[in-house]
Amino acid sequence: MVAAAMGNTGIMTIFDFILIVYGIYSITTARKMRQDHQVPQWLVSQQDLVRIRQPKEFCEQMAPKTMIFGFICAGYGLYELAVEAFLKMQMAKAIGIAVFGVGIVWFLTQLSKAKKKYM
């Protein structure tokens, strides 16, 4: 039973580190988008990438939002690590998941709007 609990904690810790790395990658990509005005392939599908008519405007609109999303991902990863290490409260985890969920929905909504506008 203890081994199973440690296994779940280990998986979540790995997930938290992945989110931190993904957040840092998103922030770096957003800076690059702002400078180079090239849409990253991980942000839109290959089919959509070739259909974007105004990549510079798309990048200008999505770079700050991608950066915010990167901070949300990295912040959530750090928050979950802290909750797991120090607080161990289910309510704190639930609040973190809810805020992270809202951040994901917000980013996907903004991305969808940008795709509609520039495709």
Image (cartoon, rainbow, N blue to C red):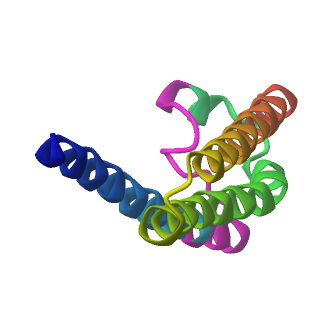
Write the residue at 54% across / 65% down: 87
User: Does the segment drawn in magenta span residue 98?
Assistant: no
| Position of the N terminus by quadrant | top left
Q: Picture coordinates of residue 56 (x, y %)?
A: 77, 56
Residue 25, percent from left and from top: 49, 66
In this rendering, is residue 30 above or below 95?
below
| Residue 39 in picture, x, y percent from top left | 61, 51
User: Compared with residue 3, is residue 14 higher up or lower down, i.e. above or below?
Assistant: below
| Numbered marks: total | 0
Q: Residue at x 58, y 57 (%)?
A: 73
**Quarter of the C terminus within the rendering:** top right
Instruction: Provide residue 35's location: percent of width, then percent of height.
Output: 69, 74
Q: Which residues are magenta?
A: 28-47
Residue drawn at x 64%, y 46% as measured from the top left:
91
Task: Tell me if residue 32 is in the magenta stretch.
Answer: yes
Towards the viewer: 83 or 54: 83
21 or 61: nearer the viewer:
21
Rendered position, 8 above or below 77: above
